[in-house]
Image (tube, helix red, strand yellow):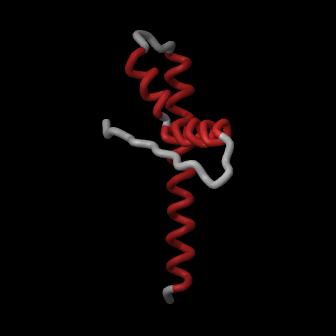
Amino acid sequence: MAAVNISVRARRNEPSDRLIRRFNRKCKKEGIVEKYKERCMAYVKPSEKKRIKRRKAKRQRERDEQKRQKYLKRAKYNR
């Protein structure tokens, strides 16, 4: 498991609560909290495992589709 360093720089005139929200959003997107909970929890119900597995598969399919669309778009212009 690779270490992930997330940093958020304050924008000009940005309130601290918005900065914290952006940081939390980035952490959630990277799945840091879920990974931590996964490692620390002793038992996960089978139904929860299935739900997590489905969620991961859906996210991976979406990423693959985005990459495919990006590739097709690039290929269309390089003809």
Residue drawn at the location 57% of the way across and 48% of the way down = 10
Task: Farthest residue to the front: give it.
Answer: 13
Who is closer to the viewer here, 65 or 7? 7
Who is closer to the viewer here, 30 or 73? 30
Q: Is residue 20 left or right of residue 79?
A: right
Q: Is residue 79 above or below residue 24?
A: below
Who is closer to the viewer here, 17 or 46? 17
Q: Is residue 59 left or right of residue 38?
A: right
Residue drawn at the location 55% of the way across and 18% of the way down = 47
Task: Farthest residue to the top: give it.
Answer: 42
Estimate the x, y position of residue 46 in percent, counting from the top left. Answer: 50, 16
Rendering quarter of residue 69: bottom right
Residue drawn at the location 39% of the way across and 42% of the way down = 5
Estimate the x, y position of residue 1 in percent, counting from the top left. Answer: 31, 36
Estimate the x, y position of residue 73 in percent, counting from the top left. Answer: 57, 75
Task: Farthest residue to the bottom: give it.
Answer: 79
Q: Is residue 34 above or below residue 77?
A: above
Estimate the x, y position of residue 21 in percent, counting from the top left. Answer: 63, 38
Residue drawn at the location 52% of the way across and 64% of the way down = 68
Q: Tag count in the figure?
A: 0
Rendering quarter of residue 16: top right
